[in-house]
Image: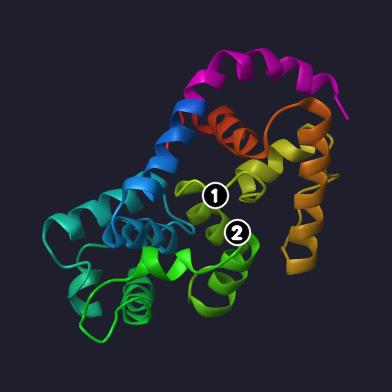
Amino acid sequence: MKNEYFYEVYDRYLEIKPSIEKRLEEYREIWEKGSNEDIHAELSFCILTPQSKAKNAWKAITNMREDGVLFQAPAEKLSEYLNIVRFKNNKAKYLVELRNKMTDENGKIITKDFFNKFDTVEERREWIVKNIKGMAYKEAGHFLRNIGFGENLAILDRHILKNLVKLGIIEEVPKTLTKRLYLEIEDKMRVFCKETGIPMDHIDLFLWYLEAGEIFK
């Protein structure tokens, strides 16, 4: 499955591989050392990312945490912080619904404790897709990768899909991604990663780097 485009970019992958490994280690530390609130912030961030710049989404989360509103303010207040992301009113409501799901009877955020009860990363992803508004497979995979569980998951946004076409993994960028198609492409990525020796969680960050010129979140 190694085509001409693969050989064009593989040297760049080797160049930035240490940076990718460093970032993935930082993700793992978020889960290992982070609090319930830290994990909740990562999950909230991924609710904000659809059709919005990741840096803007993270800036909004950071501002809400610093001002003490992320874990307690109503949607109307949260939306004031979301002018830099699209669909701010809907996303503010999603953040409140998420917070309600992840708060115990004493008003404490339990997001890390909640996800710790699942046996597999696939179970975590399925629960997110079925139960958290504003999150589908891409966003769920993004969250799980950002807390250190991305070894076997794909994050299929349009940037990644465009590069998968160039690599010959898929024939074209699909107009819509059903669950079946998403998982089929994910399986093709696993085969590609096995053949090339590039880990699954590396290839997402690398392909994003090819588009954005940096490794972010």
Identify the residue under disc 1: 149
Q: Are marks 1 and 2 in contact (CB under 8 Å)?
A: yes
Percent position of residue 200, x then y = 67, 39
Instruction: Give the spatial CA distance, label 1 vs label 2.
Output: 7 Å
Q: Is residue 143 above or below residue 108?
A: above
Residue 82 can be seen in this image:
yes
Percent position of residue 177, x then y = 72, 63
Label 1, residues with CA under 10 Å away: few <14, some 14-19, many ≥20: many
- Residue 71: name its quadrant: bottom left
- Which amino acid lies under the numbered mark 1 shown in the image of this protein? Phe
Percent position of residue 32, x then y = 38, 47
Question: Which one is earlier in the sequence, the residue at label 1 or at label 2?
Answer: 2
Q: Residue 137 or 88: which is nearer the viewer?
A: 137
Q: Tell whether 202 sits left or right of 83.
A: right
Q: Residue at x 35, y 44 (%)?
A: 55
Which segment did they paint magenta?
1-20
- Residue 12: name its quadrant: top right
**Quarter in which the N terminus is drawn:** top right
Identify the residue under disc 2: 121
**Quarter in which the C terminus is drawn:** top left
Colour scheme: rainbow
Q: Is residue 155 above or below residue 107?
A: above
